[in-house]
Image (spheres, rainbow, N blue to C red):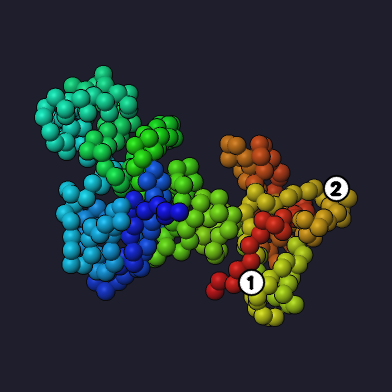
Protein backbone atom coordinates (compact mmCIF):
# COMPACT_ATOMS: atom_id res chain seq x y z
CA UNK A 1 0.00 0.00 0.00
CA UNK A 2 1.44 3.32 -1.10
CA UNK A 3 1.65 6.04 1.54
CA UNK A 4 0.37 9.43 0.35
CA UNK A 5 2.94 12.21 0.19
CA UNK A 6 2.12 15.40 2.11
CA UNK A 7 1.55 18.44 -0.07
CA UNK A 8 3.40 20.56 2.51
CA UNK A 9 5.84 19.29 5.10
CA UNK A 10 7.97 21.36 7.43
CA UNK A 11 10.56 19.68 9.61
CA UNK A 12 12.09 21.13 12.78
CA UNK A 13 11.86 24.79 11.76
CA UNK A 14 13.61 27.24 14.06
CA UNK A 15 13.93 31.02 13.95
CA UNK A 16 15.37 33.37 16.55
CA UNK A 17 15.52 37.15 16.81
CA UNK A 18 18.02 38.84 19.15
CA UNK A 19 18.70 35.52 20.84
CA UNK A 20 15.02 34.76 21.51
CA UNK A 21 13.50 31.66 19.88
CA UNK A 22 10.35 32.82 18.07
CA UNK A 23 9.80 29.50 16.27
CA UNK A 24 11.26 26.53 18.11
CA UNK A 25 11.37 23.10 16.43
CA UNK A 26 8.04 23.28 14.56
CA UNK A 27 7.04 20.34 12.34
CA UNK A 28 3.83 19.94 10.31
CA UNK A 29 2.39 17.85 7.49
CA UNK A 30 -0.57 18.96 5.36
CA UNK A 31 -2.16 16.73 2.73
CA UNK A 32 -3.79 17.93 -0.54
CA UNK A 33 -7.26 19.37 0.20
CA UNK A 34 -6.58 19.52 3.93
CA UNK A 35 -7.05 22.65 6.03
CA UNK A 36 -4.73 22.97 9.02
CA UNK A 37 -5.12 25.88 11.44
CA UNK A 38 -2.05 27.16 13.25
CA UNK A 39 -3.81 28.48 16.34
CA UNK A 40 -2.34 30.47 19.18
CA UNK A 41 -2.10 33.85 20.92
CA UNK A 42 -0.44 36.87 19.34
CA UNK A 43 3.34 36.65 19.41
CA UNK A 44 3.56 32.85 19.61
CA UNK A 45 5.36 32.48 16.25
CA UNK A 46 2.47 31.69 13.88
CA UNK A 47 3.09 34.41 11.31
CA UNK A 48 6.87 33.88 11.38
CA UNK A 49 6.27 30.22 10.53
CA UNK A 50 4.06 31.27 7.62
CA UNK A 51 6.67 33.72 6.32
CA UNK A 52 9.36 31.04 6.34
CA UNK A 53 7.15 28.70 4.32
CA UNK A 54 6.38 31.51 1.87
CA UNK A 55 10.09 32.25 1.49
CA UNK A 56 10.08 35.84 2.72
CA UNK A 57 11.83 34.85 5.98
CA UNK A 58 14.77 32.46 6.25
CA UNK A 59 14.84 29.79 8.94
CA UNK A 60 17.86 29.27 11.16
CA UNK A 61 17.46 25.51 10.80
CA UNK A 62 14.97 22.95 9.52
CA UNK A 63 13.59 22.11 6.08
CA UNK A 64 10.50 22.82 3.97
CA UNK A 65 9.16 20.31 1.43
CA UNK A 66 6.41 20.50 -1.21
CA UNK A 67 5.10 17.20 -2.62
CA UNK A 68 8.13 15.46 -1.16
CA UNK A 69 10.68 17.78 -2.79
CA UNK A 70 12.96 20.05 -0.79
CA UNK A 71 12.29 23.72 -1.49
CA UNK A 72 14.32 25.28 1.30
CA UNK A 73 16.92 24.51 3.92
CA UNK A 74 19.71 26.71 5.27
CA UNK A 75 21.74 26.35 2.05
CA UNK A 76 19.35 25.54 -0.79
CA UNK A 77 16.45 27.93 -1.40
CA UNK A 78 13.82 28.15 -4.14
CA UNK A 79 12.71 31.80 -4.40
CA UNK A 80 9.17 32.70 -3.25
CA UNK A 81 7.78 33.28 -6.75
CA UNK A 82 8.65 29.72 -7.80
CA UNK A 83 7.23 27.87 -4.79
CA UNK A 84 3.64 27.59 -6.16
CA UNK A 85 2.35 28.93 -2.86
CA UNK A 86 -0.56 31.38 -2.64
CA UNK A 87 -0.85 34.03 0.06
CA UNK A 88 -3.86 35.73 1.64
CA UNK A 89 -3.60 38.38 4.35
CA UNK A 90 -5.89 40.44 6.55
CA UNK A 91 -5.51 43.64 4.51
CA UNK A 92 -6.31 41.99 1.12
CA UNK A 93 -3.38 43.94 -0.49
CA UNK A 94 -5.28 44.78 -3.68
CA UNK A 95 -3.75 47.31 -6.08
CA UNK A 96 -6.06 50.37 -6.00
CA UNK A 97 -4.98 51.60 -9.45
CA UNK A 98 -5.74 48.27 -11.15
CA UNK A 99 -9.16 46.98 -12.16
CA UNK A 100 -10.63 43.88 -10.56
CA UNK A 101 -9.65 41.88 -13.64
CA UNK A 102 -6.07 43.16 -13.56
CA UNK A 103 -5.80 42.44 -9.83
CA UNK A 104 -6.94 38.85 -10.28
CA UNK A 105 -4.71 38.31 -13.31
CA UNK A 106 -1.64 40.04 -11.87
CA UNK A 107 0.39 36.88 -11.26
CA UNK A 108 -0.72 34.99 -14.38
CA UNK A 109 1.52 34.06 -17.29
CA UNK A 110 0.47 33.28 -20.84
CA UNK A 111 -1.33 35.08 -23.63
CA UNK A 112 -3.97 37.70 -23.06
CA UNK A 113 -6.92 35.50 -24.03
CA UNK A 114 -5.92 32.66 -21.68
CA UNK A 115 -5.38 35.07 -18.81
CA UNK A 116 -8.75 36.71 -19.39
CA UNK A 117 -10.48 33.33 -19.46
CA UNK A 118 -8.92 32.32 -16.13
CA UNK A 119 -9.90 35.67 -14.56
CA UNK A 120 -13.49 35.32 -15.75
CA UNK A 121 -13.68 31.73 -14.48
CA UNK A 122 -12.54 32.72 -11.00
CA UNK A 123 -14.70 35.82 -10.73
CA UNK A 124 -17.66 33.67 -11.75
CA UNK A 125 -16.86 31.25 -8.94
CA UNK A 126 -16.73 34.00 -6.32
CA UNK A 127 -19.86 35.67 -7.81
CA UNK A 128 -18.09 38.90 -8.78
CA UNK A 129 -17.97 38.71 -12.57
CA UNK A 130 -20.22 41.76 -12.80
CA UNK A 131 -17.40 43.81 -11.21
CA UNK A 132 -14.70 42.58 -13.60
CA UNK A 133 -13.96 46.08 -14.94
CA UNK A 134 -14.53 47.86 -11.62
CA UNK A 135 -11.94 48.96 -9.06
CA UNK A 136 -11.30 47.89 -5.45
CA UNK A 137 -12.61 51.13 -3.93
CA UNK A 138 -16.02 50.38 -5.48
CA UNK A 139 -16.31 47.08 -3.56
CA UNK A 140 -17.32 46.24 -0.02
CA UNK A 141 -14.86 44.60 2.38
CA UNK A 142 -16.36 41.18 1.74
CA UNK A 143 -16.17 41.66 -2.02
CA UNK A 144 -12.54 42.78 -1.78
CA UNK A 145 -11.77 39.65 0.22
CA UNK A 146 -13.26 37.48 -2.53
CA UNK A 147 -11.20 39.32 -5.16
CA UNK A 148 -8.10 38.61 -3.04
CA UNK A 149 -9.08 34.94 -2.93
CA UNK A 150 -9.54 34.84 -6.73
CA UNK A 151 -6.13 36.49 -7.22
CA UNK A 152 -4.44 34.01 -4.87
CA UNK A 153 -6.06 31.07 -6.70
CA UNK A 154 -5.37 32.34 -10.22
CA UNK A 155 -1.90 30.72 -10.66
CA UNK A 156 -3.32 27.40 -9.31
CA UNK A 157 -1.09 27.21 -6.22
CA UNK A 158 -0.58 23.83 -4.61
CA UNK A 159 -0.54 25.43 -1.15
CA UNK A 160 -2.44 28.41 0.28
CA UNK A 161 -1.09 30.31 3.27
CA UNK A 162 -3.67 32.48 5.03
CA UNK A 163 -2.73 34.94 7.78
CA UNK A 164 -5.87 36.04 9.68
CA UNK A 165 -7.59 36.80 6.33
CA UNK A 166 -11.10 37.22 7.79
CA UNK A 167 -10.36 39.29 10.91
CA UNK A 168 -11.05 42.60 9.15
CA UNK A 169 -14.54 41.58 8.06
CA UNK A 170 -17.83 42.44 9.69
CA UNK A 171 -19.12 39.58 11.86
CA UNK A 172 -22.30 39.48 9.79
CA UNK A 173 -20.29 38.62 6.65
CA UNK A 174 -17.48 36.58 8.13
CA UNK A 175 -19.08 33.15 8.47
CA UNK A 176 -20.49 33.12 4.94
CA UNK A 177 -17.23 34.25 3.33
CA UNK A 178 -15.18 31.77 5.37
CA UNK A 179 -17.43 28.91 4.28
CA UNK A 180 -17.36 30.04 0.65
CA UNK A 181 -13.55 30.36 0.69
CA UNK A 182 -13.13 26.94 2.27
CA UNK A 183 -15.41 25.33 -0.31
CA UNK A 184 -13.44 26.77 -3.23
CA UNK A 185 -10.07 25.80 -1.76
CA UNK A 186 -11.22 22.21 -1.20
CA UNK A 187 -12.55 22.03 -4.77
CA UNK A 188 -9.09 23.06 -5.98
CA UNK A 189 -7.51 20.32 -3.79
CA UNK A 190 -5.28 23.00 -2.27
CA UNK A 191 -3.41 22.33 0.97
CA UNK A 192 -4.25 25.21 3.32
CA UNK A 193 -2.35 26.53 6.33
CA UNK A 194 -4.49 29.12 8.12
CA UNK A 195 -3.06 31.25 10.91
CA UNK A 196 -5.57 32.53 13.46
CA UNK A 197 -5.82 33.48 17.12
CA UNK A 198 -9.58 32.77 17.20
CA UNK A 199 -10.55 29.28 18.45
CA UNK A 200 -14.03 29.53 16.91
CA UNK A 201 -12.53 30.13 13.47
CA UNK A 202 -10.17 27.19 13.83
CA UNK A 203 -12.96 24.89 15.00
CA UNK A 204 -15.17 25.99 12.10
CA UNK A 205 -12.61 25.69 9.31
CA UNK A 206 -9.94 23.17 10.25
CA UNK A 207 -9.55 19.50 9.49
CA UNK A 208 -6.64 19.66 11.93
CA UNK A 209 -5.58 22.18 14.56
CA UNK A 210 -1.98 22.78 15.62
CA UNK A 211 -2.08 24.67 18.92
CA UNK A 212 0.99 26.89 19.24
CA UNK A 213 2.46 28.54 22.32
CA UNK A 214 5.83 30.26 22.87
CA UNK A 215 7.16 29.17 19.49
CA UNK A 216 6.25 25.50 19.82
CA UNK A 217 3.33 23.30 18.80
CA UNK A 218 1.99 21.96 22.10
CA UNK A 219 -0.90 19.90 20.71
CA UNK A 220 -2.05 18.79 17.28
CA UNK A 221 -5.06 16.84 16.03
CA UNK A 222 -8.67 16.98 14.86
CA UNK A 223 -10.67 19.86 16.41
CA UNK A 224 -12.80 17.49 18.49
CA UNK A 225 -9.75 15.79 19.98
CA UNK A 226 -7.91 19.03 20.72
CA UNK A 227 -11.01 20.42 22.45
CA UNK A 228 -12.00 17.33 24.43
CA UNK A 229 -8.51 16.02 25.26
CA UNK A 230 -6.48 19.14 26.12
CA UNK A 231 -2.85 18.65 27.08
CA UNK A 232 -2.87 21.17 29.92
CA UNK A 233 -4.87 23.82 31.74
CA UNK A 234 -3.81 26.57 29.30
CA UNK A 235 -5.14 24.51 26.37
CA UNK A 236 -8.55 24.26 28.06
CA UNK A 237 -8.61 28.01 28.75
CA UNK A 238 -7.64 28.93 25.20
CA UNK A 239 -10.86 27.45 23.80
CA UNK A 240 -13.29 28.58 26.50
CA UNK A 241 -13.70 29.86 30.04
CA UNK A 242 -12.44 27.34 32.54
CA UNK A 243 -13.17 26.74 36.21
CA UNK A 244 -10.32 25.53 38.42
CA UNK A 245 -10.61 23.74 41.75
CA UNK A 246 -7.37 23.05 43.65
CA UNK A 247 -7.10 19.70 45.45
CA UNK A 248 -4.62 17.32 47.12
CA UNK A 249 -4.12 13.74 46.06
CA UNK A 250 -4.46 10.81 48.42
CA UNK A 251 -4.59 7.22 47.23
CA UNK A 252 -4.74 8.28 43.56
CA UNK A 253 -7.84 10.38 44.32
CA UNK A 254 -8.17 14.18 44.40
CA UNK A 255 -10.44 15.28 47.24
CA UNK A 256 -12.69 18.32 46.65
CA UNK A 257 -15.99 19.79 47.82
CA UNK A 258 -17.48 18.19 44.69
CA UNK A 259 -16.35 14.72 45.72
CA UNK A 260 -13.36 12.62 44.77
CA UNK A 261 -11.79 12.56 41.32
CA UNK A 262 -9.47 9.98 39.86
CA UNK A 263 -5.88 11.25 39.78
CA UNK A 264 -3.77 8.32 38.58
CA UNK A 265 -0.04 8.86 38.41
CA UNK A 266 0.05 11.65 41.01
CA UNK A 267 1.87 10.84 44.29
CA UNK A 268 0.09 11.33 47.61
CA UNK A 269 0.23 14.93 48.79
CA UNK A 270 0.55 16.36 45.27
CA UNK A 271 -1.57 19.42 44.51
CA UNK A 272 -3.62 19.18 41.33
CA UNK A 273 -6.03 21.42 39.45
CA UNK A 274 -9.45 20.02 38.57
CA UNK A 275 -10.43 21.95 35.43
CA UNK A 276 -13.91 22.03 33.90
CA UNK A 277 -15.89 24.26 31.55
CA UNK A 278 -18.90 26.37 32.62
CA UNK A 279 -21.32 24.37 30.46
CA UNK A 280 -20.59 21.26 32.50
CA UNK A 281 -21.79 22.71 35.82
CA UNK A 282 -25.23 21.54 36.97
CA UNK A 283 -27.28 24.00 39.08
CA UNK A 284 -30.08 23.21 41.58
CA UNK A 285 -32.07 25.47 43.90
CA UNK A 286 -31.69 24.81 47.63
CA UNK A 287 -35.46 24.26 48.04
CA UNK A 288 -35.28 21.88 51.00
CA UNK A 289 -32.15 23.31 52.53
CA UNK A 290 -30.25 20.11 51.88
CA UNK A 291 -29.43 20.43 48.20
CA UNK A 292 -29.97 17.82 45.47
CA UNK A 293 -29.21 14.13 45.80
CA UNK A 294 -25.76 13.21 44.49
CA UNK A 295 -25.37 10.98 41.45
CA UNK A 296 -22.46 8.77 40.45
CA UNK A 297 -21.92 10.84 37.31
CA UNK A 298 -22.12 14.26 38.93
CA UNK A 299 -20.39 13.58 42.24
CA UNK A 300 -21.11 15.42 45.48
CA UNK A 301 -23.24 18.62 45.50
CA UNK A 302 -21.48 21.70 46.86
CA UNK A 303 -23.21 24.78 48.27
CA UNK A 304 -22.66 28.11 46.49
CA UNK A 305 -24.05 31.65 46.48
CA UNK A 306 -24.89 33.63 43.33
CA UNK A 307 -22.59 36.62 42.85
CA UNK A 308 -24.01 37.86 39.53
CA UNK A 309 -25.88 36.70 36.45
CA UNK A 310 -25.74 38.04 32.89
CA UNK A 311 -27.75 37.21 29.78
CA UNK A 312 -25.37 36.60 26.84
CA UNK A 313 -27.85 36.10 23.98
CA UNK A 314 -28.09 32.34 23.51
CA UNK A 315 -27.26 31.54 27.12
CA UNK A 316 -26.92 32.99 30.58
CA UNK A 317 -23.66 33.19 32.53
CA UNK A 318 -23.98 32.80 36.30
CA UNK A 319 -21.05 33.35 38.66
CA UNK A 320 -20.98 31.70 42.08
CA UNK A 321 -18.86 31.94 45.19
CA UNK A 322 -18.31 28.54 46.80
CA UNK A 323 -19.18 28.33 50.48
CA UNK A 324 -16.32 26.11 51.55
CA UNK A 325 -13.38 28.21 50.33
CA UNK A 326 -14.64 31.25 48.42
CA UNK A 327 -13.58 29.91 44.98
CA UNK A 328 -15.42 31.57 42.09
CA UNK A 329 -17.22 29.18 39.70
CA UNK A 330 -18.87 30.10 36.38
CA UNK A 331 -21.80 28.21 34.93
CA UNK A 332 -23.64 28.66 31.64
CA UNK A 333 -27.33 27.87 31.20
CA UNK A 334 -29.25 27.81 27.89
CA UNK A 335 -31.70 30.68 27.32
CA UNK A 336 -32.63 33.12 30.12
CA UNK A 337 -31.66 32.26 33.70
CA UNK A 338 -31.13 35.28 35.95
CA UNK A 339 -31.09 34.39 39.65
CA UNK A 340 -30.62 37.32 42.01
CA UNK A 341 -27.35 37.88 43.85
CA UNK A 342 -27.29 36.10 47.21
CA UNK A 343 -29.44 33.17 46.10
CA UNK A 344 -28.20 29.87 47.53
CA UNK A 345 -27.83 27.00 45.07
CA UNK A 346 -26.09 23.63 44.89
CA UNK A 347 -23.61 22.81 42.16
CA UNK A 348 -22.39 19.52 40.78
CA UNK A 349 -19.95 18.87 37.97
CA UNK A 350 -19.76 16.04 35.46
CA UNK A 351 -16.81 13.82 36.28
CA UNK A 352 -16.40 12.73 32.65
CA UNK A 353 -15.98 16.37 31.57
CA UNK A 354 -13.25 17.27 34.08
CA UNK A 355 -9.51 17.32 33.51
CA UNK A 356 -6.86 16.76 36.17
CA UNK A 357 -3.50 18.51 35.75
CA UNK A 358 -0.54 19.30 37.97
CA UNK A 359 -1.32 22.46 39.93
CA UNK A 360 -0.02 25.65 38.33
CA UNK A 361 1.97 27.95 40.55
Q: Which residue is mark 1?
A: 272
Q: Quadrant of the C terminus?
A: bottom right
> Is 69 positioned to the left or the right of 236 in the image?
left
Q: Secondary structure at mark 1?
A: strand
Local crowd size for mark 1, using a 10 Å CA cut-off: few (<14), some (14–19), many (≥20): many
Earlier residue among tags 2 and 1: 1
Q: Secondary structure at mark 2?
A: loop
Q: Position of residue 175 (x, y in %)?
A: 44, 35
> Is 212 positioned to the left or the right of 336 in the image?
left
In the picture, the disc for residue 287 is 2
Badge 2 vs badge 1, beta-carbon distance below 8 Å: no
Figure check: 263 above or below 32: below
Q: Residue furthest front?
A: 1
In the picture, the disc for residue 95 is none
Q: Is residue 144 visible?
A: no
Q: Position of residue 244 (x, y in %)?
A: 62, 63
Local crowd size for mark 2, using a 10 Å CA cut-off: few (<14), some (14–19), many (≥20): few
Alpha carbon separation for disc pair 2 and 1: 33 Å
Residue at the image position 22 percent from the left and 50 percent from the top: 83
Along the viewing direction, whichever of 206 and 332 lies nearer the viewer: 206
Q: Quadrant of the N terminus?
A: bottom left
> Is 320 positioned to the left or the right of 344 in the image?
left
Residue at the image position 18 percent from the left and 56 percent from the top: 78
Q: Is residue 326 visible?
A: yes
Residue at the image position 14 percent from the left and 24 percent from the top: 113
Along the viewing direction, whichever of 9 and 314 lies nearer the viewer: 9
Amino acid sequence: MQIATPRLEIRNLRRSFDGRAVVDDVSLQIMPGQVTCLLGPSGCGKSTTLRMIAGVEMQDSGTIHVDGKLICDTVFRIPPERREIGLMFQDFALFPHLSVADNVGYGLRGNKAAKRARVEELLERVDLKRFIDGYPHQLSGGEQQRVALARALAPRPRIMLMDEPFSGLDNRLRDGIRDETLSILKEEDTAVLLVTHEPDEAMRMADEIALMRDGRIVQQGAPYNVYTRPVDRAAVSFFSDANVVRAKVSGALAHTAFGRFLAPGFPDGTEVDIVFRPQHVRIDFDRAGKGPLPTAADGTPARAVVERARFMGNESLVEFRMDHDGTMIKATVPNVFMPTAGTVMWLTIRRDKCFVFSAEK
